[in-house]
Structure formats: structure tokens, C-alpha cells
Amino acid sequence: MWWKFLKAVTHREHHVAPTTWIAAIAAVVYTFAPIDLIPEVVLGPLGLTDDIGVWGILAVLAVREHRRWQAAVRA
């Protein structure tokens, strides 16, 4: 079902909320930015928690968008 959702998004059949787009862009930028809230150099693997948190927020928003799309398809 996720492939159909991604196809609907790429073919502009489903409008993704602006907050989801902003979160996606922010997650990518934050992951690759040299500035980190919890640096891995200092805290080791514990430093990855902020990166995982950002991607977790994005995952929650993606699931929300998927549910919105499913509700629209069923209606």
C-alpha cells in the first residue's frame, strides 16, 4: 500500500501537508549538517539519539499522511 501512496504523491494525486515537507527537508539537512545538538564525537553512539529523534518525527508525519491518503481513497 505504501507504493501506491508514493505513486499518488509523485503523480500529485495526493497533496502532502507543508509541515510534512518542511520536516522532511529539515531531517535531511540536520542529518548531513556539520552542526549537531548531541555530537557523536563526544558521546559516541548516544550522540545519534537526536538524529533518530528527527527521523522519528518524520516517520510519524509520514504515517499521518498515509492515513489521510487512505481515508481519501476510501471515501
Image (tube, rainbow, N blue to C red):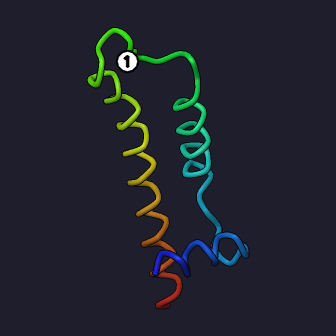
- Residue that sits furthest to the right in the current view: 11
- Residue that sits furthest to the top in the current view: 42
Element assignment for label 1: helix
Q: Nearer the viewer, residue 52 or 11?
A: 52
Residue 44, relative to residue 28: is it above or below?
A: above
Residue 68, relative to residue 47: is it above or below?
A: below
Q: Residues within 10 Å of mark 1 (few under 14, many from 20)?
A: some
Q: Nearer the viewer, residue 34 or 75?
A: 34
* Residue 20 shown left or right of residue 36 in the figure: right
The residue that appears at 42% across and 43% down in the rendered structure is 55
- Where is residue 69? Give x, y as percent: 51, 76
Q: Amino acid at mark 1?
A: Glu
* Residue 41 shown left or right of residue 12 in the figure: left
The residue that appears at 31% across and 30% down in the rendered structure is 49
Residue 68, relative to residue 61: is it above or below?
A: below
- Where is residue 68? Give x, y as percent: 48, 72
- Where is residue 33? Give x, y as percent: 58, 24
Q: Tell me the residue that label 1 is attached to.
A: 40
